[in-house]
Structures are given as C-alpha cells and as structure tokens.
Amino acid sequence: MADESPKIRIRDLHKSFGENHVLRGLDLDVAVSESVVVIGGSGTGKSVLLKCILGLMEPDQGSIEIDGTEVVAMPRAEREQLMHKFGMLFQGGALFDSLKVWENVAFGLIQAEGMERDQAREIAFAKLAQVGLGEDVAALLPAELSGGMQKRVSLARAIATEPEIIFFDEPTTGLDPIMADVINDLIVKCVRELGATTLSITHDMASTRKISDRVAMLYEGRIIWAGETDGIDTSGNDHVDQFIHGRADGPIKMAVRRS
Amino acid sequence: MNPLAAIGRAFLAFLAATGRIGLFTVSAVSHCVRPPIYPRLIGRQLIEIGYYSLPVVGLTTLFSGMVLALQSYTGFARFSAEGAVATVVVLSMTRELGPVLAGLMVAGRIGASMAAEIGTMRVTEQIDALTTLSTNPFKYLVVPRILAGLISLPILVLVGDIVGVFGGYLVGVNKLGFNAGNYLSNTWEFLEAIDVISGLVKAAVFGFLISLMGCYHGYNSGGGAQGVGLATTNAVVSASILILVSNYAITEMFFAR
C-alpha cells in the first residue's frame, strides 16, 4: 500500500439489525487510485458496508474516513457536498424509469452541479459513447433496454460527474458471462481514464480478478483476509479457498437470512 | 397469549407509526419552505394530480349534484319545501360533497399512484441512487407532490362545485320542472363566501393529506412487490380516513356555534 493516507479508512465498523449482527468490527483501507473488491457470500453484509460508507445507513459504532475526514454522523449539508466525490453503480442499475437514458446519465450534472441541460446532454452522449452506446439509445427509456445495456447506462451515469471514488455493487450480477466480461472491461477502462479509487462488492470471481488490485474477504462481519489479487489463489486461508472455488463443504456456513 | 399484551403491543405500534408519520410530516413541511425547489417537477405533478383528475372529479360531482337534486326534491316534497332544492344542492356541494368526493376520488387515483411509484423507486434502489447523485429525495420526490396536492385540490374542488351545481340545475330544470331563472336565483340567494371558502380550505388540507400519505407509504415501502402493494393500499385507506376525520374537524372549526 502507498505511504499516503488512505482514500477510504474504515475502523471497527459495527451494524446490527435487531439480533442480527451484520458488521462486527470491520477494518478496511482503500488507497488513492486503488481498486479494492470485497468478496463474501450472500447475506454477509457487503451491501450494508457500502450503504454505511455512502451514508444510506448509519453504523452503530466505528469510524469511516474519506480523505481523512470522518463521515459517520456527518451533517446532511456536508454529506451532500461529500456525495460529489462519489459515483455508484447499483446492482439492479437503479436507473430512473421516468427519465430518458441521456437524462439518467446527465442527472448528477444537472441536479447536483447545476449544469445547463444542453451542455449536460453533450456530456451524457460522450459518456454513453465511452461505454459503447450510441446516440440512438439516448432517447430511449430504461425499460426499453436489455440488462447489459442498463448496466452500461448505469456505469455511464456513475462516471458522468467524474467522481473521485466509484462504488460498484455486484456489477455483473444477472448478466451472461460474455456481457459480464464486457462490463468488467468497461469498468477497468473507465476507472483508468478517470484515475478514480474504487470499492466494489461482488461474489463473481471472474469479475474480481479482472477489476481489482486488492481483494478483501468479508466473513461474519469482519475482513478475515486481504491481499493482492494475484495472491488470492495462494492465500493459505481456508475460507478464501472455499469461496473462490465455490465449494459447498468447508468452514463457511452460508447464512440463510438476508442481512 | 395474554390479551392485554396484545392490546399493548398494538397500541405501541400505533404510537410508533404516529411518531414516524409526524417526523415525516415535519421533514416534508420544512423541505417545502427551503430551497432548492424544483418548479419543473411541481408543474409535472400539477398536471398529473390536477389536470388528469378533472374527468373523474367532474363526473363524480356532476352525478352527485343530479342525485342530490332528485333526493332533496322527493324528500322536501313531503313538507312542501321543494323551493329549497337549489339552496340545498349548492350548500351541500360547496361545503361538503365537492371537497369530500373530490378528495376521496383523488385519494384513490393519486394516493395509490404516488405510493406505487415511490415504493417501486424504493425497492429498486432509485431513491438511494438519488442520494448518491447529491439530490435530496425529499426535495425531489416528496416536496413537488405535496405542493402540487396543496394547489391542485382547491382548483379541482372549485370546478367540482360548479359542475355539481350544474348537475342539480339540469335535473331541477329538465326533470323536476323548475323555472331556470328561479332555480339560479335560489342558488345564489343563500350562498355565502364562507360556504365556498370552507370547501376550498378543506380541499387544500385534503390535497396535503393525500400527497403526504402517498409519499409516506411509498417512501417507507419494503419487501418487493408485496411491500409496494401494501404501501398502495395503506396510502389510500389512511388518506381516506384522514380526509373524513379532518373534514369533521374543519367543519367544526368553521360552522360550530
């Protein structure tokens, strides 16, 4: 890891829902311009981790620093300013179905940055081109697109404001292997061009190997292993080995309830 | 199972729900008076709530006015008071039937649609997406709907009042044999400004309540399609009940001696 202070620094993060202790003292650092993927089974709290960082959920305890600034319990106005640094690709795309494709991509530029619609539309077209979509798609509604195209539009929206940090929530879920690889390539290309820091969560190992510099394994509310992506096959950790090879037998007992 | 515990649990759940709605209301109202406000979205909601509800409100009030004329005529004939039909129609429409019927019809049409739309946005993470795009979901989704409800319901009720009185006129003149001039003069003679104003105040309150309940239940929807369905039902039922309760309170405020 670089000497400079991390872009994202998480310490002793706890989050419970009633009796269900999802995060139990999670620590994680993401360096500037680094791409970290958090892997882990369904229901282990990967989405909760992202939501806590994004301020969509309030952690029960612990610290989250972005660029050295504590963001837990940050006042709403400051949080809205902080959001300018973030881009997010949601698992289901989360495109606004009442808006056209280009309006979705330009949303952050118009609403958050107060850009004129004409100028924002030009940028939206450029971002759509960056993810391989033509201007003919721009005037369609999200419901008229395939799953893969929706993911591309969602990626274009995530990078439209050129954020410093981009979060990817299961970026390849629901896609066929070829389209998943296309999305992975686009993520790598777009992130490199922006020089952004990324934090992704997934259980797709092909995606993990392609888009990450470092991998962290989340299990029972803590990061139980973290290391370079190239070293994941020789981690020496039984939990990681079971997960990356997708074996039912092993130390990991899958949760049956959603966190 | 202890029945007292069950009653206690239900009561606590009721108090918690009331508290949540209270906090949501305070937050919604405070956002209504703080920038940024989105005029484009308010305009879109005014068309959705006001313009597209005109047919249903017009038809409802037209037939209600017609029925009111018929019923009051047959009732008053027993006391040889048929001449009061026009007055009864106009007072009933402006004070009660106009706002309540329009409110209930709009609650069914708009409250359900708001809850379903916002609820779907909740379960498909579109509301979270708004937050990540530095846009306050309250300002973007809730405020335009509440302001549009507050503005459009009084206009709808004013139209409904006129259409309802016209329905009574049609039946009075064409079926019951009233002289058109006499019917109109009877309509105006006893009508006071407070009759219309009280109806419009009710309409504004109903518009606020319909939008508030639609937004609240949609915003707090969960559990996929079933959750959205439940939110829709709850939005319509709670708005309808609140309309009837607040109708009594406002009537008491204006007309209690």
Image (tube, coloured by chain):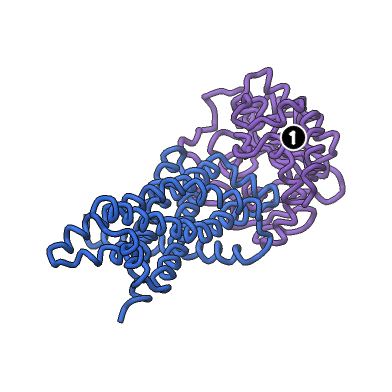
Q: How many marks?
A: 1
Instruction: Name the quadrant containing residue B165.
Output: bottom left
Indicate the position of residue A49 as horizontal and vertical percent values. Answer: 62, 45
- When the figure is inspected, residue B154 is found, relative to residue A16, above or below; the finding is below
The chain letter corresponding to purple is: A
Indicate the position of residue A40 as horizontal and vertical percent values. Answer: 60, 35
Q: Chain of mark 1?
A: A
Q: Tell me: B78 left or right of A60.
A: left
Q: Tell me: B101 left or right of A67.
A: left
Instruction: Name the quadrant containing residue A144.
Output: top right
Q: Tell me: B21 left or right of B88.
A: right
- When the figure is inspected, residue A204 is found, relative to residue B32, above or below; the finding is above
Residue name at image x 65 percent, y 65 percent: B34
Residue matched to label 1: A156
> Residue type at mark 1?
Ala
- Pick the residue in front: A9 or A157: A157
Identity of the residue furthest to the top in this view: A178
Determine the secondary structure under disc 1: helix
Residue name at image x 60 percent, y 57 percent: A61
Quadrant holding the N terminus of chain A: top right
Q: Note whether residue B221 is visible.
A: no
- When the figure is inspected, residue B75 is found, relative to residue A1, above or below; the finding is below
The chain letter corresponding to blue is: B
Residue name at image x 27 percent, y 57 percent: B68
Residue name at image x 82 percent, y 37 percent: A122
- Pick the residue in front: A107 or B127: A107
